[in-house]
Amino acid sequence: MATFEGRFTDATDLRVAVVVSRFNDLVTGKLLSGCLDCLARHGLDTSATSPQLDVAWVPGSFELPIVTKALANSGRYHVLIALGAVIRGDTPHFDVVVSEASKGIALVSRETGIPVIFGLLTTDTMQQALERAGIKSNLGWSYALQALEMGSLMRELHSANLSK
């Protein structure tokens, strides 16, 4: 029996891209900060000249899948993180954006074989979003941990010739 698990201890050769929605940037900016803090504390170079990390900004969460797919198709990254925040309003717009962004992000992972961490907050209020982006805890940190684990796991599977 083989057991495969990702590790958090060494991110020195991991390449990560983060795609961030500008819409609700009060929230997404905080998610990005938590994400970068976690990656840096686990050994990933997050400096402005980092060869390990790229950040791409998109207008809104609806645009996350297309840019995530372009980055995944580049072959440069071991794992991607998609960050966004959709807050329910008085119209059905929330449901459309959440549904399409979710399906699109999942499809990118399935089609490319590159893990895409789903960091799309879907909340009823701004207060709930802010709580998840740093007032109570910062989920950006959790998304980065998931990225480290999945990047490591996929490398392990690849070296065992199971990923393709």
Image (cartoon, rainbow, N blue to C red):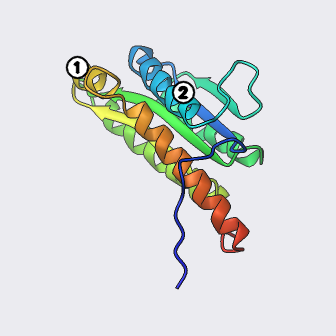
- State the residue position of label 2: 36
Residue situated in front as seen by the camera: 19 or 141: 141
- Asked whether, in this view, residue 132 is left or right of residue 15, the answer is left
Q: Is residue 153 above or below residue 80?
A: below
Eye-nearest disc, 1 or 2: 2
| Residue 155 point in image, percent of width and height | 67, 59
Q: Quadrant of residue 12?
A: top right
**Is residue 1 visible in the rendered structure shown here?**
yes
**Which residue shows up at 46% across the image and 50% down it?**
103
Q: Amino acid at mark 1?
A: Gln
- Asked whether, in this view, residue 48 is left or right of residue 20, the answer is right
Mark 2, other Cα within 10 Å: few <14 / some 14–19 / many ≥20: many
**Which residue shows up at 52% across the image and 64% down it?**
5
N-terminal label among 1 and 2: 2
**Which residue shows up at 67% across the image and 49% down it?**
78
| Residue 161 point in image, percent of width and height | 72, 74
Give the farthest residue toward the front. 9
For label 1, the SS is: helix
Alpha carbon separation for disc pair 1 and 2:
23 Å
Q: Is residue 46 above or below residue 15?
A: above
Give the farthest residue toward the bottom. 1
For label 2, the SS is: helix
Q: Amino acid at mark 2?
A: Leu
Label at residue 127: 1
**Is residue 97 visible in the rendered structure shown here?**
no
